[in-house]
Image (cartoon, helix red, strand yellow):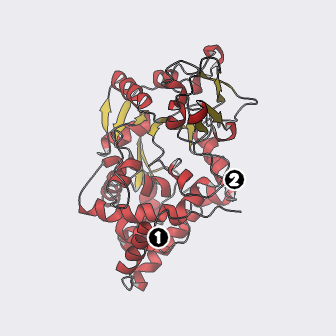
Amino acid sequence: MKKKILTCTKKKKKNKQLLTENLDGEHNMSNKEAYMKLIERHREWVFGLPDSEFLMPLLELRFTSEEAEFLSNLPFMPHTAEKLSESLNIDIDVLSEKLDDFAKRGLVMRVEGRRRIQYALTDAIFNFYRMPGWKGGVDEWNRKIVPYINQYYIDAMANEFLNHPTQGLRAIPINETIKDPRKIMPYEDILKVIDSAKYFAVSTCACRHRHNLDPEFEECKHETMNCLHFDTLGKYTVQNGLGKEITKEETLEILAKAADAGLVHGVSNTKNGIDTICNCCPCCCLYLESIVKIPAPVPRGHQPSNYVREIDEEKCIGCGLCARRCPMKAIDHIKEEKRVIFNPDQCIGCGVCVHKCPKEAIYLVHSEGEIDVPSNMMELGLRLLNERGRNLDTVRRKNTL
C-alpha cells in the first residue's frame, strides 16, 4: 500500500488552498491536451507524473503547451539531431536550435561524445527537482514556480519517487568513518569515487534552492553551492549554464566542509560511472525531508550503504551529539541517563554520526549481507522500470527511433 504524504502545518494547508485558488479557471482546454500527452509520456518512463491538483499549474509554469507538445514526441533514450530531425520531420537547423535551448533549461539532456552529440528527454525528477534549482536563479519565475514544485512533491510526487525498493541515490560513508577500511569496495570509498572522475563541476543544491525561495519553508542554514557532478553530467551542467567547472582539490574541499556540517554524501546508486555526489540535509533533501512528512513506517531515505553504526560503550560519554547529527533520527539521546539508544533499522550507514564524535566512540562496521548495487546506469534504470511495472519491450520500442 502506498504511503500518503501529509502536509505538516496549517500554514502549508492554507498555502495549498491559495495556490489552487489562484489558478482556478485558467486552464485552456485546447492547451490541456498537449500537457496530458506529455504526462502520459512520462508515465511510460521511470518516474511518472501522478495526478494532483498542483500538476497542471506546475506544467503550465514550466513550459508552454507548444513546448509540451514538442517534448511529448521526444524519446527518453539519446538520439542524434539528424535522427530526430528525420523522425519529427523538422529542419535540422531549427531543431538543433530548439534542442540546445531546451538543454539550457534542463528539459533535454545534451550529451557530447567524441564523434557526435545526442539528445534525450529528461525525466520528471530531473525536470522539476534538479532543474531549475541547479542554476540557482532567484528571479520572479523561480519564486513563482518553487511553491508548486514543493507542494506537488508533498501532495503526490514523493510517493511515486520513494515508494519502491531501489533509490536513485545511495549513501556513501564519510571518509575515515569505517573501522576496518581494508575491505571497502571502490564504489563505497568516497576518495576512490573522486579519483575515478576526470572532470569536476559544482551546481547549486536544487533541494535547498526550492526550499529557500519558498516562503512556507524556513531558510536552510547550509551551503548551497555543493552539488557535485562529474564527467559527462558535469560537462552538461557547465556547457548549459547550470554549474561551473572546479578542480579535484576544490571538490575534496567541498566534501570536507559538507562532512563537518553534518551533510549526507549521496552518490549515484551504481558501482561504475558515478556522476553525482549530493551533500544532503534532512530539512531539504528529496530523500530525507520525507522523514517528517510521511507517517510511519518511515521511508529509508537514500539507498543504505553496506555499513551500520557501532559504538564502544566504554568510550561513550552520552553527550548526544550523534543523535543531533543523525539525519535519519536513528539515535535517541536519553539526557538524564547520559546514554543513547540506536535503531539500526533506520540507519543508512552514512557516517555523519561518526565524523564528529568527540571521544571517537562510534564507528561503522560492515552490515550483515551485502546490498546489491546496480553495476551501471543502464542496470539502475532497468531496475527502476521493473519495480514500477513498466513493460521493457514497450519502453524500448517507444524510445528507439
Asked if marks 2 and 1 touch (Cβ < 8 Å), the reply is: no
**Can residue 114 be seen in the rendering of this structure?**
no
Q: Amino acid at mark 2?
A: Asn
Mark 2 to mark 1 CA distance (whole Å): 25 Å
Location of mark 2 (residue): 386
Residue at the image point whose x is 58% and y is 45% from the top: 301
Looking at the image, residue 367 lies above or below residue 227: above
- Give coordinates of residue 204: x percent, y percent: 34, 43
Mark linked to residue 55: 1
Residue at x 59% of width, y 60% of height: 159
Q: Secondary structure at mark 2?
A: helix
- Does 63 sit above or below residue 191? below
Residue 95 lies in quadrant: bottom left
Residue 306: name its quadrant.
top right
Secondary structure of the residue carrying numbered label 1: helix
Q: Mark 2, mark 1: which one is toward the viewer?
A: 1
Q: Quadrant of the C terminus?
A: bottom right
Identity, as a three-letter code, of the amino acid under mark 1: Leu
Seen in the image, is 107 located left or right of residue 282?
left
> Which mark sits nearer the N-terminus, 2 or 1?
1
In x, y percent, where is residue 288? 52, 47
| Label annotation for residue 107 | none
Q: Which quadrant: the N terminus?
A: bottom right
Give the class, few, some or many, for how many residues have Cα within 10 Å of label 2's Cα (few <14, many ≥20).
few
Q: Position of residue 370 (x, y in %)?
A: 72, 31
